[in-house]
Amino acid sequence: EKVCNHIDKCKGLMIYDIDGKNIVTSYFSDIKEDEDNSFLQLIEKIGVQTLITNGISDQELLKFKENNIDVMSGVFGKADEIVEKLLK
């Protein structure tokens, strides 16, 4: 899976469980927002600590930071390759 062009267009997330500098597991999780669950609430339920995306608005970025979720924006490419590089 590739990193989304913008967080608003994201249909799902690649989730990585990390132990030190190793990927323990990874899986794709569909994102199904509804009137009761925002994107932020959904990723909090999953336990996301760091969000990697290409584009995000300042307003969205602030919401994630206020909820202690680190955001790396301006990232392009395949998710697996990006995560592996970050862990080195």
Image: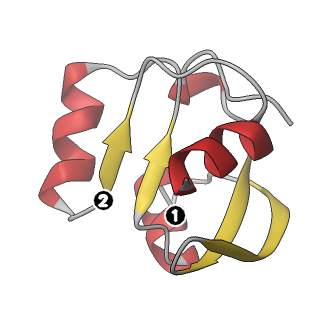
Answer few, some or many: residues within 10 Å of disc 1's Cα (few below 14, many 20 plus, some between 14 and 19): many
Quarter assignment of residue 40: bottom left
The structure residue drawn at horizontal position 60% and vertical position 76%, both measured from the top left corner, is 18
Q: Secondary structure at mark 2?
A: loop
Left or right of residue 69, residue 31 in this image: right
Mark 1 or mark 2, which is nearer the start of the sequence? 1
The residue identified by callout 2 is 69
Q: Secondary structure at mark 1?
A: helix
Label 1 near label 2: C-beta < 8 Å? yes
Q: Residue 4 appears at what percent x and percent y?
A: 67, 25
CA separation in Å, label 2 and label 1: 9 Å
The structure residue drawn at horizontal position 62% and vertical position 15%, both measured from the top left corner, is 5
The residue identified by callout 1 is 43
On screen, residue 86 above or below 68: above
Amino acid type of the residue tagged 2 in the rendering: Ile
The structure residue drawn at horizontal position 62% and vertical position 18%, both measured from the top left corner, is 76
Quadrant in which the N terminus is drawn: top right
The structure residue drawn at horizontal position 40% and vertical position 67%, both measured from the top left corner, is 49
Left or right of residue 43, residue 14 in this image: right
On screen, residue 75 above or below 45: above
Q: Residue 57 appears at what percent x and percent y?
A: 31, 19
Q: Name the mark on residue 21.
A: none
On screen, residue 62 above or below 76: below
Amino acid type of the residue tagged 1 in the rendering: Ile
